[in-house]
Amino acid sequence: MNRKLEEIRNSSLTKSWFGGACFTDTVESEQWDSYDIENSLASIFIIVKGHGDHINRKLDGLSRPDAKFTSGHVAFINAGSRISGEFLAKCQFLEITVKDEFIDQFSPRTKSALYKSPSFSYLCDMSSKAVIQELMLSMHNADPHDSLLIDGSAAFLTAKLLQAADRKLNSTKLELSKNKSNLVLSYIEDELSNNIKLEELSNLVGLSVSHFCLAFRATTNCSPHQYMITRRIEKAKALLKSTQNGLNIANLALTLGFSSQSHFTKTFKQVTGVTPLVYFRESKN
């Protein structure tokens, strides 16, 4: 069965991020090609589960075949490429399209290191794998407050790819200074009940979004979204312990910035192992 990549994208689960869009789908063993269309935006193609054979790219009339890759492999597809490929078995993929202005946040040296490689791909590290899993879960979640997760995950994975392409950038220490770290963490604490945007945090410390995502994780060992969720749950636990009667979980969820009671309950149980109601009752014993 032959399908155009554009058709696969159109039938995929899709979510927007400020730097482009994310697509994910599970496809059976099939060939797909798009030689009659151009990839208008650069994109990052990730095999989440399964086995892909290869991606054949044509840029400026030259064929640029990538090596075979399996789960965890990340390939960069230049804007303007015409691409084809084949899935040898059932395969789950994630594609992140990236606008030029996002890539322009990096230095000319970094962009050159990425673009000059005729077939740039790499095997993602543990931090990237964790972010991919977070993003995949969010892709299937209808929560409108997940913009920090979607934006942060896509930006981090794009930045990691650029970091992998540029050895000099890869060796650069990207941690936030103590003052900048305290500024960001204090801001998150003050805005826990609100839907924080990634640009708000990066602007606080005068960094591009891409550099901020790398620096924040290097400093805290988690993403901005993970940190925010951890703080929300800690605050929820404190409020549940201090509440004596008249517990209203729906109001508590909204107070803490969750979109609904069910979203709060699900997240609370994922973090603590019990529901808010069970935690409330156990705290009174």
Image (cartoon, grey):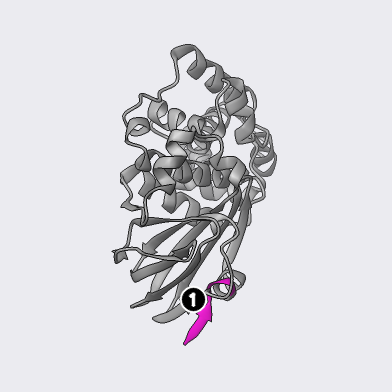
Judged from this view, the residue extending furthest toward the front is 61
Q: Is residue 258 left or right of residue 82?
A: right
Image position of 58 with respect to 273: above or below: below
Between 67 and 194, the residue placed more toward the observer is: 67
**Circle 1: residue type:** Asp
Image position of 280 with respect to 89: above or below: above
**Residue positioned 41% across, 27% down in the render:** 220
Is 2 within the magenta? yes
The residue wearing badge 1 is: 33
Rendered location of residue 78, percent (x, y)? 49, 55
Residue stretch in magenta = 1-6
Assign a secondary structure to mark 1: strand
Between 226 and 270, the residue placed more toward the observer is: 226
Judged from this view, the residue extending furthest toward the top is 179
**Residue positioned 63% across, 57% down in the render:** 142
User: Does the image show residue 1?
Assistant: yes
